[in-house]
Amino acid sequence: MGKRAEEAVLKHKNGYNCAQAVACTFADIMNMDEKDVFRISEGFGFGMGACETCGAVSGMLMVASSLSSDANLEAPATKKQTYRLMTELQAAFKEKNSSTYCRDLLGGAGKPKLRSCPGCVEDAASLLEEMVLNKE
């Protein structure tokens, strides 16, 4: 487990939701204030509060998008590369965990648990370290 993945798991253990734990761990390299990232990502925990897309995945995608976008308001040119990166990250997470949906990952209703929340946080942060940070 990389340094940032360890930090993300610790943040989750200390009360951050899964999206916050991942996104806030990378606030510094997004050149954003951690409090702002914390606020923006809060509603994405617990699968956007409804067991939909895993919050750790949402946090991972927020970070990757922030780092991939050219932020050019007049002539955006990075959408395609950003969408490609989103697809790659989600596919890698799904390959590790069989799903990107909170309801599947946590199990329930007679279904087995595929991965714990801290495990999802670790995986999402690790994928960012491997696929995004190591490419820079």
Image (tube, grey):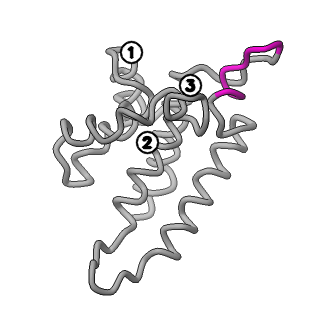
Q: What residue type is labelled 1?
A: Lys
Q: Position of residue 35 (x, y in %)?
A: 18, 36
Q: What stretch is highlighted in magenta?
A: 103-110
Pointer 1 or 3: first along the chain: 1
User: Which residue matches tag 3?
Assistant: 119
- The answer to if 105 sits in the magenta stretch is yes
The CA distance from mark 1 to mark 2 is 16 Å
The circle on residue 59 is: 2
Quarter of the rendering containing residue 45 = top left
- Residue found 60% across the figure and 20% down from its top: 116
Given contact means CB atoms under 8 Å apart, are the residues at marks 1 and 2 in contact?
A: no
Q: Nearer the viewer, residue 114 or 1?
A: 114
**Label 2: which secondary element:** helix
Q: Position of residue 76 (x, y in %)?
A: 36, 81
The CA distance from mark 2 to mark 3 is 14 Å
User: Which residue matches tag 1?
Assistant: 13
Q: Residues within 10 Å of mark 1 (few under 14, many from 20)?
A: some
Viewer-side label of 2, 3: 2
Q: Position of residue 6 (x, y in %)?
A: 40, 28
- The answer to if 58 sits in the magenta stretch is no
The CA distance from mark 1 to mark 3 is 11 Å
Pointer 1 or 2: first along the chain: 1
Q: What residue type is labelled 3?
A: Gly
Q: Residues within 10 Å of mark 3 (few under 14, many from 20)?
A: some
**Label 1: which secondary element:** helix
